[in-house]
Amino acid sequence: MKRPIGVQIEGSIYANNSDDLTQEEFLDAFIEFVENRGWSFGGGSF
């Protein structure tokens, strides 16, 4: 059985303008992005 290959990311996300980007706002968009592609995410954020 083939072992699934995944991607590990580490970094920071900032808005392109001077607005603040809240954790909740980012996570909502990120999870929607992931789920729309049939992927899953395991991890955390801070």
Image: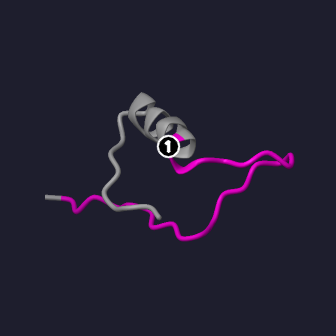
Residue 22 or residue 15, whichever sits in front: 22
Quadrant occupied by the N terminus = bottom left
The residue located at (59%, 47%) in the rendering is 22
Q: Which residue lies furthest to the bottom in this view?
A: 10
Which residue in the structure is indicated by mark 1? 24
Residue 3 or residue 45, whichever sits in front: 45
x%, y% of residue 24? 50, 43
x%, y% of residue 14? 72, 56
Residue 5, by quadrant, is: bottom left
The residue located at (37%, 61%) in the rendering is 44
Q: Is residue 14 magenta-colored? A: yes
The residue located at (51%, 66%) in the rendering is 9
Classify 19 as above or below 29. Answer: below
At numbered mark 1, what does the secondary structure look like: helix, strand or loop?
helix
Query: Label 1: how many residues lie within 10 Å, few (<14), some (14-19) or many (20+)?
Result: few
x%, y% of residue 10? 53, 71
Q: Residue furthest top?
A: 36
Q: What stretch is highlighted in magenta?
A: 2-24
Name the side, left or right, on which 45 lies relative to 2: right
The residue located at (63%, 65%) in the rendering is 12
**Residue type indicated by callout 1:** Glu
